Image: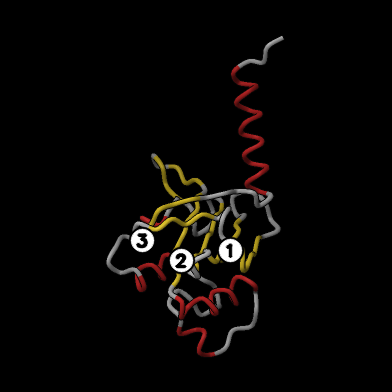
């Protein structure tokens, strides 16, 4: 007996969502002519919420072989990674190249470590010690639209 198209599609979507929720989500994007790939880069820091659903998110910092660092964040429709498509909010993800002077602070935030006074001067770090990727992009990558970092 052959599977129907809906059964095959449902199985595919279920497998993709399982991989996404288990951290196996691989993302690759070209930014400023450089390739950023979560599969080939080394994971430096990782944080994920325990809740599932629209509020679930994961954040990580990666180091490329050439020494560059980048931030990868993904989340549901009720997170800062949300995107609006045809009037509906859906989950999304971003890859943001990091300035070398900001890496230590952003790794501290992702790891959940205590921040020093000087860490709050890093672009994108709010008063509560969270990393706002959109604001970081408007300051550090001010020459372009921050939405270009969405995956």
Q: Look at mark 3 in the image and give the residue it sits on.
A: 146
Q: CA distance from mark 3 to mark 1?
A: 18 Å
Residue name at image x 34 percent, y 68 percent: 141
The residue furthest left is: 143
Residue name at image x 68 percent, y 42 percent: 18
Q: Quadrant of the N terminus?
A: top right
Disc ID at residue 25? none
Q: Look at mark 2 in the image and give the residue it sits on.
A: 133
Q: Look at mark 1 in the image and give the residue it sits on.
A: 60
Residue 33 horizontal side relative to residue 71, left or right: left
Residue name at image x 27 percent, y 67 percent: 143
Mark 3–mark 2 contact, CB under 8 Å?
A: yes
Nearer to me, 127 or 70: 70
Mark 1 or 2 closer to N-term? 1
Mark 1–mark 2 contact, CB under 8 Å?
A: no
Q: CA distance from mark 3 to mark 2?
A: 9 Å
Residue 109, image x, y percentages: 58, 74
Give the image quarter of residue 58.
bottom right
Give the image quarter of residue 148.
bottom left
Residue 124, image x, y percentages: 45, 74
């Amino acid at each position: 007996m052959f599977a129907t198209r809906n059964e095959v599609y449902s199985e595919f979507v279920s497998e993709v969502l399982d991989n996404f929720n288990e951290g196996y989500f691989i993302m690759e994007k070209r930014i400023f002519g450089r390739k950023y790939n979560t599969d080939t880069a080394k994971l430096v820091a990782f944080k994920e919420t325990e809740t599932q659903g629209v509020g679930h998110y994961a954040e990580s910092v990666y180091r490329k072989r050439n020494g560059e660092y980048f931030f990868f964040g993904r989340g549901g429709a009720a997170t800062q990674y949300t995107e609006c498509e045809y009037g509906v909010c859906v989950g999304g993800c971003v890859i943001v190249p990091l300035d070398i002077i900001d890496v230590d602070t952003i790794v501290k935030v992702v790891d959940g470590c205590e921040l020093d006074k000087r860490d709050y001067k890093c672009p994108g770090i709010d008063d509560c010690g969270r990393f706002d990727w959109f604001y970081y992009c408007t300051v550090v990558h001010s020459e372009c639209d921050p939405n270009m970092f969405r995956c």
